[in-house]
Amino acid sequence: MAGELIGFTSKQELLAKAERFWNPGKTRFWTQSGVPLVIGRREGYVIHDIGGKRLIDMHLNGGTYNLGHRNPEIVAALTRAMGYFDIGNHHFPSVARTALAEALVATAPDGIAKVMYASGGGEAIDLALKSARYATGRRRVVSIAKAYHGHTGLAVATGDERFARLFLADRPDEFSHVPFNDLDAMERALAPGDVAAVIMETIPATYGFPLPAPGYLRAVKDLCERHSTLYIADEVQTGLMRTGELWGITKHGVAPDLLVTGKGLSGGMYPIAAVLATEQAAAWMEADGFAHMSTFGGAEAGCIAALRGLEITTRPEVRSMSHHIAAFFTQGLDRIQAKYPDWFTGVRQDGLVMGLEFAHPEGATFVMRRLYSRGVWAIFSTLDPHVLQYKPGLLLDPALGAQILEITESAIGEAREDAFAERGAPSRALADDVIPAGAGDVPLGDLPSFPADPAARSLLAEQLGAWAASGEPPYPHPSNAR
């Protein structure tokens, strides 16, 4: 059909073109790992591959879908917003941006007074680091070894060297890394008095959710205050009620100088992230409010989605549900661990932040494949693949929770056999989940169509005709070349 936006006819064609035109490394990795997932329909905590395979989402894209995919209340708010707003103009005050900023400050830890916007978590981390540098007049930043704070310019330098070195962004003179939970190492790093900020995820996600030792985060904040260093709490994955409180850092008695939120802020319906800051940390906004700009940061339609998402997340019922769901999985996982103690060796948990530990350096990859085969999607921890990231949603119902645990028990048992057989691939064939090249192709199912509007095309033709009748030649032309 003329003007149709998507012309793929099969999954095999789509995967081939994804490898050719999008990201060959990612596409090959997941296909070769037995997870050739291309997400089609999605609703609540269930996603469907475009070939029809049903999966319960326990990855949630790092907490982006805390409230479920396409949460009806957020969809309704965003749909209504689209009838009035667009992204707005970042130069000017805005109804939507101001309303969201006020709501975020009202729910923030003590001392937070200002909000800055970004389109994603990495950009927001960059903005937090720039703010800290201005506020302190210092350049150095300290983060945790095996950290992950995004892939943008400054953010990638705070993270693991795997990503920083690839883009020549490792700068040891400006970015130092110390072991997590090592207070002495942190004190040595801050002792010279030249550190602008310490940045930490409250629970480092990509490192497998190691839990902070009791008192550790509070002690780091004390060190920061002693050395006039700002504390940045990266709550992109641990915020928004995932630990049973809106902001995980508050459970540790820490009021950060800057707090970064993103991912689940808009329920996965619009890209938006934010930096919450104290007056001191946001001082650049008084000195030169134009010093940082982001065309899409704080897009007005996205702010409406985020306002509804924040309102849902802060409902007392949702907080209570998160506690019930956490207790439900604690019980269930304890039972499964007792069945396979030599394989399933531990659970790292704070509320709905859960990391499942296995007795193999890459144990989580075995479990991930078996879960996928049985209809649950959860992902290994990139920087510690013996840990599986296991993340129930805030609005999960008991029936789906029971189904998840039943599948998890079977998958863990099967993965144990796979790993103990010391094979690189699962011992039971997963042929149904792999798309072999050139064979057994899968149609795209109920993928919607996006045809062009003939009336809109006719209007364009009329407009073009009006321009042609004016006698002005089309670009390029010497008179309007730049």
Image (tube, rainbow, N blue to C red):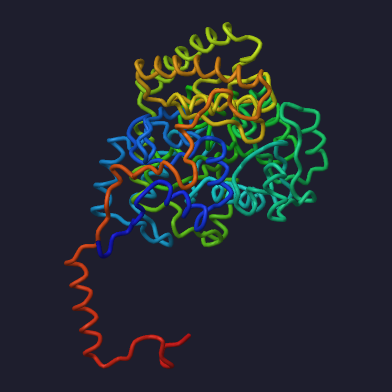
Left or right, residue 188 beside residue 344: right
Name the one closer to the observer, 220 or 174: 174
Query: In what quadrant of the picture does the N terminus appear?
Result: bottom left
Q: Return the residue nearer the eye: 464 or 173.
A: 464
In which quadrant of the rendered view does residue 190 lie?
A: top right
Q: Nearer the viewer, residue 358 or 158?
A: 358
Vertical comparison of 159 with 167: above or below: above
Where is residue 253? Give x, y as percent. 59, 24
Name the spot of residue 467 as percent of width and height, x first.
Answer: 25, 85
Residue 481: image quadrant is bottom left
Q: In the figure, residue 304 lies in which quadrant?
A: top left
Q: Can residue 460 be seen in this view?
A: yes
View extreme (front): residue: 439
Query: Is any part of residue 138 visible from this angle?
Result: no
Q: Which residue is drawn at 36% across and 15% down?
A: 398
Residue 109 position in % (x across, y down): 52, 32
**Side of 358 where 317 appears, left or right:** left
Q: Is residue 271 above or below residue 336?
A: below
Image coordinates of residue 347 in percent, x first then y, are 59, 17
- Residue at position x 25%, y 58% from top? 451
Name above or below for residue 61 compared with residue 468.
above
Residue visible at 46% across and 53% down in the picture:
297
Q: Tag count in the figure?
A: 0
